[in-house]
Amino acid sequence: MNSEVTTPNQDSRPKLSKKKSVKRLKTLGLIFTVFGISLFAYFVYSVGLNSILDGIAKIGFGGFAIILLIYLTRLTVRATAWRLSVHEPNNLSVKDTLPAVIIGEALSSMIPLGILVSGTAKAVAVRKKVPLVVGLSSVATENLFYSLITGLFISIGAFAFLRNFELESSWIYLIDFIIGFIFFCIAVGAFIVVRQWTWLSDICDWIYEKGVLPKILEKGRFQVRLFENLIFSFYRKYPKRFFPLCFLQVLFHSLGILEVWFIISRISESLPAFSTAFFLESMSRLVTIVFKLIPFLVGVDEAGAELIVETLAVGTGIGVTMAIIRKGRTIFFAGVGVLLIVKRGLTFKEIREISKEEYGH
């Protein structure tokens, strides 16, 4: 009788804890979103709405079409990299992966911490072509290459920025710390793959044995182990794919630099140097990573771009205008992603349920 009374209470604890965590995340997301909107309003006011509209007018419909084409090419590059990350005998074409990448990017942009569900969304979008676990592992493999090259890209950009321009000491210390942390993570990640270390799953096992997060790790630790094995086996089976995958990630960021250069060349009075576009794009990647909790990076993207532009003495208001224009293409493709989600009959609830089934959370 006593066990019948206590069991429901024990079972309800993880659910209550989960509800509290979700509520806290939503609250934090709301706070950051309000902060971002306030920051956005401040920069629009400080630069001037007419100045921003003039800059947008200089882009025109033709210029915006070129920006959309560049971004579509970038997404196609990521889709191609993902295709190369799939284990044989399974196979995906770019025709399969590109819509899934657009769906994942849409969720990543629209939802606070959407990056946590974007990978699952990609795998769910191609589940009729390959098993779900294959989709998830291939997404994880591609993300490893993306993270590696992105880390190097940000570090090189930050290092060059620090050495060429005068900044306040607090900014220098912060950026130096971030550079060091990125290189540390890259080095650890490289050693883990090359040495075939199972640190992540071992840590999950250790946490589970300590009685922490038992509901999540009961299944999740085995999935982590499975992912490790799949990624390690990919390294052993397809060493010739490593250079093409790295090259595609470099091409992805290079196209981002081209997009920034094109926008500034249209809204600025003088033709910008490619180094200016490089600094802006590398710092934009950093802002994207740090402030992913804010939907569409409202406010913080404009603030980061304007800070870099002012430091480079490119022109007042150009950073804010550029960030708004790039936000426009992000919103456009987010809309395309939503249409693809509706067309394929996918729902966010379904993605979360599959995530819960696969990972136990």
Image (cartoon, grey):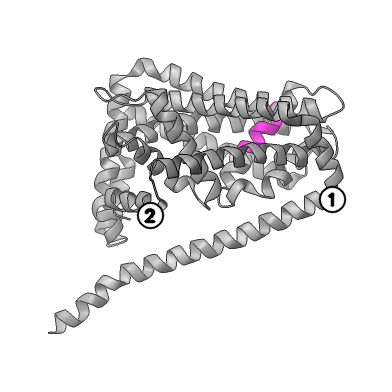
Residue located at (54% from left, 37% from top)? 182
Write the start and end of the magenta stretch as one range: 278-285
**Viewer-proximal residue among 10 and 122:** 122
Residue 41, percent from left and from top: 76, 54
- Residue 126 lies, with reference to residue 203, above or below; the image says above
Q: Quadrant of residue 287?
A: top right
- The amino acid marked with disc number 1 is Ser
- The amino acid marked with disc number 2 is Lys
Quadrant where the N terminus sits is bottom left
Secondary-structure class at tag 2: helix
Magenta stretch holds residue 161: no
Q: Is residue 273 left or right of residue 154?
A: right
Residue 132, percent from left and from top: 29, 39
Residue occupied by mark 1: 46
Q: Quadrant of residue 169?
A: top right
Residue located at (45% from left, 33% from top)? 99
Residue 218, percent from left and from top: 24, 55
